[in-house]
Image (tube, rainbow, N blue to C red):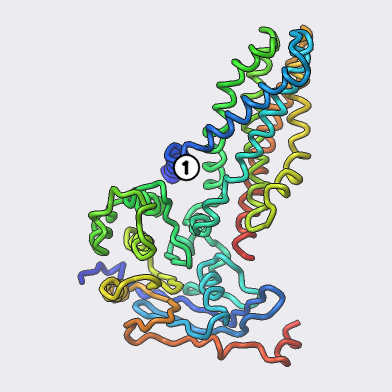
Amino acid sequence: MVTSSSDRENVYFASDQVACFRGGRTVFVGVTFSINSGGAVLVKGPNGIGKSTMLRILAGLMRPIYGTLKWHDHKTHVEPEIHFKRIHYVGHHDPVKPALTVIENVSFWASLHGTRDHVQSALEEFDIAHLADVPARFLSAGQKRKVNLTRILTAPTRLWLLDEPTTGLDAATVAKFEQCMAAHRNSGGMIILSTHTPLDLPEAQVLNLSDYQPEAAAHDNLY
Amino acid sequence: MTTFIEIVRRDLRLSMRHGMDTIMVVMFFVLVILLLPLGVGPEPTVLARISGGMIWVSALLASMLSVERLFQTDYEDGSLELLVIQPFMLELTVTAKVISHWLITGLPLLIIAPLLAGMLHTGKDGFAALLLTLAVGTPLLSLIGSIGAALILGARQGSILLSLLVLPLYIPILIFGVSAVDAAIHGLPWRLPVLILGSLLIGLAPFSVWATAAALRETMRR
């Protein structure tokens, strides 16, 4: 893959002592990791440990009760719009409007990121180009997920935050998506993802949230 | 600016494809007004006297019914959390959505109102005042309604909560709207209430947009 030198510029994203308090309990404390261009972090842990919450914090949807996120030396919450420009977030829902066609759905999100040039090629990437003019209400759950993943290919961003991205996908599409992730990392992108199915993510750091559970004593110290 | 237009266009397109929002609001509006002569009797003098108030109250309720869905579907399918983390100000998105809400529900009310005013014998003096106050007042209803719509996201019994939150805030709009129409029907000057409505619109527009955006951000943090 050919990349320009500016794409290659090294970036650095770090979570420093991040803690989250939600629903009357401390979900995790002291989550610290850093990630460079081309890197990947695999967020692990049993159900309910706070993987989705962690990804929402990294996306800027939620604020940590303690700790900071840094992009180089800039705290991301100071100018959230700049952080939002760097990320793509895939959550549990597929934001696909049943009344709009596949291409209308993808084009809308692409246009919010300022470009529609890659819509067609992104659709072809996931083999849904033939569905372009089909209203999304006729899509299966897996196809809706493909449309959602197509969305993140239409506009280049540095950091992908993926919360169980391969839910409902068939093996061929999962393999395709692994290639997309590898290409993204090769061009200097970063990926932070949580998954319960095995995904090929070479040299990924593992962030096990079980290691950051608050102990009873730590609980008292925090408050 | 292009993103702004994109969001308006998407909401209008969604509304066109479903088609229900506009029809529901207009049908509600017309039906309430149609019931009125059945309730108070058909005398033209009585109807003319209460027509301004009735049209305003129905418009207000119709707007409130539809504003509930302003963010609801986007919230349920995850579009809203993506809209919150787009690389531009959330206030812009909110403004676009409020404008589309007005185009989908407020504008049709404005178009159908003259017909209903004719049915209720409002008379030509009251007619102009009614149209003008509705033109200024319905965007205000959408703006204030959007705050409520953002606050009730994720709540059970949201529609009841919405009316409790929003109806008290609608009271000034109703008072000035109706007083302008009444004054016009009685041949009195009605400029002042319209000017007050206009200044409310100018003053509340930025505040409502800001408050709605803040409520949406807060929703995402829960």
Q: Nearer the viewer, residue A45 or A116?
A: A45
Residue B10 lies in quadrant: top left
Residue B114 lies in quadrant: top right
Residue A51 is left or right of residue A64, and the answer is left
Q: Residue furthest left?
A: A2
Residue A107 is left or right of residue A125, and the answer is right
Q: Which amino acid does label 1 sit on?
A: Asp
Is disc 1 surrounded by few (<14), some (14 to 19) or many (20+) residues within 10 Å?
A: many
Indicate the position of residue A50 as horizontal and vertical percent values: 57, 78
Residue appearing at x 39%, y 52% in the figure:
A137
- Do we see residue B5 in this rendering? no
- Do we see residue B77 in this rendering? yes
Q: In which quarter of the image is the C terminus of chain B?
A: bottom right
How many marks do you count on the picture?
Answer: 1
* Relative height, residue B24 to residue B74 (above, below): above
* Relative height, residue B203 to residue B112 (above, below): below
Q: Nearer the viewer, residue B36 or B160?
A: B36
Q: Quadrant of the N terminus of chain B?
A: top left
Q: Nearer the viewer, residue B140 or B51?
A: B51
Indicate the position of residue A129 as horizontal and vertical percent values: 24, 56
Q: Which of A23 and B119 is in front in this view?
A: B119
Indicate the position of residue B211 as horizontal and vertical percent values: 67, 49
Q: Name the residue under label 1.
A: B11
* Relative height, residue B49 to residue B9 (above, below): above
- Return the chain for callout 1: B
Q: Tag 1, which secondary structure? A: helix
Indicate the position of residue B29 as horizontal and vertical percent values: 63, 28
Residue appearing at x 72%, y 47% in the figure:
B160
